[in-house]
């Protein structure tokens, strides 16, 4: 009861009409213009903060008026704190709605307020009374009066009470909450929004509607040149009305997508905003000024999650504009796909904790892999040898039924773990992973995991001077490794810098199968 009474009381105090008239006005929807209803709903949906802000902007003595009307106490003393605050909150909502009524209807006197409202059938009628104000443009931009009544009404009241409010920006909202939030964000920004061209203000309004406070912060972080670069040439979206408007609008929007409206797309702006809000190391201003259309294009060619990964790596200093441009060219040449970029970002992010990625590896090192026509997306090990040459191990392939050269982990696993082609090949040495073969009475020791095997190859490459086409043996393992795995020496074969295969050659857990002359199993300890 306190809330209903307070709403009516606040509305009455604002309009200056009799209590009973206001009560009838609220109870009779046909008599209330859509614009008035819209702001009342906004105040209720947005909570006390919205109504209070509007009230404080338009009248400094409203708190006193509220207290005078509040039957549950005064400013100095409240008889019932809960009822006092309930009345206070709802009184503000009613008062804000009344202010809209007076402003939208041209400040009608109390004696004619009800009649004026009753004669106003639609929000567009309210708009027609405002022809001499710039707010009319905001109302006219949206043709669907029913759908956008809240947005138009709210933009109107905000423009009326705030001389610094930017009409092209506020006009982008088609809901009351959207218009109010745009107004709040503009008021909080350091950037001089009102000095921007109308088209840029419209573009900014659309951007802030999508990105909220994070977007406002990013715009404030940009200097004037970076802001121009960030938004580029605005894409103008024409509003289409009339028969088949929806279909025509869709066709127009589709054509708009093919127009080059600045090289930073709407989607990329949104991803930049996400990363800028999440990462302390990412500097949006520096990024925009240090990159160009060619380097940023790669960010438009991958999905949003990958874009954010790349921007995060840029912020950490792992990527530079030249790397982005090189990736873009590799995509053009078909040497790189999104999966390669994702793997690269993951390596750069985790290299400090990944024992199979050397922590000194840089973006230009990883780009050397696809540059040579190799598969970065399945690369599982990257290291520089004792001479600083890049060496890596890919997933590779094993398909003995084709003429293609088998290589990589797939080849190593098939030949030297699973024992494929043992009978066809002259000899096969096996990594000790607990295999059980029918031709061998006892299982091979289970002393190594796939991770152990990869780390053994990594160690051999890191501590050896190699050539792009190489085959070498390595035995300088720590004694603890030898004791745990039963492997004391391995052989690694390199082709074009890439590990083709590797296998153990000596150790207490090493066994070899020799098919030549039916020799069979031999211990290599």
Image: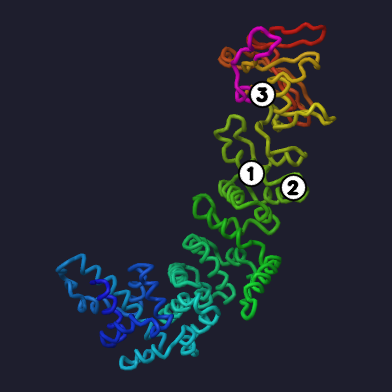
Q: On the rendered image, what quadrant is the C terminus found in? A: top right
Q: Position of residue 254 (x, y in %)?
A: 68, 67
Q: Position of residue 292 (x, y in %)?
A: 67, 58
Check residue 394 in the rendering and tell me which mark sits there, or answer none.
Answer: none
Density class for disc 2 (Cα within 10 Å; few <14, some 14-19, many ≥20) is: some
Density class for disc 1 (Cα within 10 Å; few <14, some 14-19, many ≥20) is: some
- 319, above or below 190, in the image: above
Q: Residue at x 68, y 13 (%)?
A: 437
Q: Residue at x 53, y 76 (%)?
A: 168
**Left or right: residue 44 compared with residue 340:** left
Residue under label 3: 457
Label 2–label 1 contact, CB within 8 A: no
Check residue 342 in the rendering and tell me which mark sits there, or answer none.
Answer: 1
Density class for disc 3 (Cα within 10 Å; few <14, some 14-19, many ≥20) is: many
Q: Position of residue 209 (x, y in %)?
A: 51, 66
Q: Is residue 370 magenta?
A: no
N-term-proximal mark, 2 vs 1: 2
Q: Is residue 450 magenta?
A: yes
- 298, above or below 259, in the image: above
Q: Residue at x 66, y 31 (%)?
A: 383
From the image, state whether disc 2 or disc 1 is nearer to you.
1
Q: Which residues are magenta?
A: 436-454
């Amino acid at each position: 009861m306190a809330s209903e009474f307070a709403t009516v009381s606040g509305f009455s105090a604002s309009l200056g009409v009799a209590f009973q008239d206001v009560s009838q006005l609220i109870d009779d929807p046909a008599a209330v213009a859509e614009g008035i209803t819209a702001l009342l709903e906004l105040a209720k949906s947005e909570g006390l903060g919205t109504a209070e802000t509007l009230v404080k902007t338009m009248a400094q003595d409203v708190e006193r008026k509220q207290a005078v009307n509040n039957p549950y106490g005064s400013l100095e003393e409240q008889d019932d704190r809960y009822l006092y605050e309930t009345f206070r909150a709802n009184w503000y909502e009613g008062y804000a709605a009344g202010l809209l009524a007076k402003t939208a209807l041209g400040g009608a006197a109390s004696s004619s307020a009800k009649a004026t409202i009753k004669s106003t059938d639609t929000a567009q009628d309210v708009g027609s009374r405002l022809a001499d104000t710039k707010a009319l443009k905001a109302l006219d931009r949206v043709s669907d009066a029913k759908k956008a009544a809240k947005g138009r009404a709210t933009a109107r009241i905000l423009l009326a009470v705030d001389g610094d409010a930017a009409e092209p920006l506020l006009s982008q909202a088609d809901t009351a909450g959207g218009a109010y939030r745009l107004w709040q964000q503009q008021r909080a920004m350091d950037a001089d929004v009102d000095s921007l061209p109308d088209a840029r203000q419209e573009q900014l309004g659309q951007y802030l509607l999508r990105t909220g406070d994070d977007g406002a912060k990013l715009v404030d972080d940009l200097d004037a040149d970076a802001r121009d670069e960030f938004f580029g040439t605005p894409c103008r979206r024409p509003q289409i009305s009339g028969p088949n408007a929806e279909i025509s609008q869709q066709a127009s929007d589709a054509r708009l997508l093919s127009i080059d409206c600045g090289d930073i797309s709407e989607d990329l702006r949104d991803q930049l905003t996400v990363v800028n809000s999440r990462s302390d190391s990412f500097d949006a201003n520096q990024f925009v000024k240090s990159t160009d259309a060619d380097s940023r294009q790669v960010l438009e060619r991958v999905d949003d999650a990958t874009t954010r990964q790349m921007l995060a790596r840029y912020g950490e200093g792992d990527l530079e504009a030249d790397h982005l441009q090189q990736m873009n060219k590799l995509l053009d040449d078909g040497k790189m796909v999104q999966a390669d970029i994702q793997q690269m970002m993951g390596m750069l992010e985790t290299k400090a904790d990944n024992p199979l990625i050397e922590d000194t590896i840089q973006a230009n090192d990883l780009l050397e892999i696809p540059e040579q026509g190799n598969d970065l997306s399945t690369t599982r090990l990257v290291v520089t040898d004792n001479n600083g040459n890049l060496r890596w191990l890919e997933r590779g392939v094993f398909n003995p039924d084709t003429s293609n050269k088998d290589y990589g982990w797939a080849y190593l696993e098939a030949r030297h773990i699973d024992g494929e082609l043992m009978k066809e090949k002259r000899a096969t040495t096996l990594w000790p992973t607990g295999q059980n073969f029918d031709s061998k009475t006892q299982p091979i020791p289970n002393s190594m995991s796939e991770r152990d095997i990869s780390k053994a190859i990594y160690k051999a490459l890191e501590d050896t001077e190699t050539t792009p086409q190489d085959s070498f043996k390595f035995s300088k393992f720590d004694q603890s490794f030898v004791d745990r795995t039963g492997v004391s020496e391995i052989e690694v074969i390199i082709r074009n810098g890439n590990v083709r295969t590797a296998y153990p050659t000596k150790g207490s857990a090493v066994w070899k199968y020799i098919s030549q002359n039916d020799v069979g199993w031999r211990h290599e300890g």
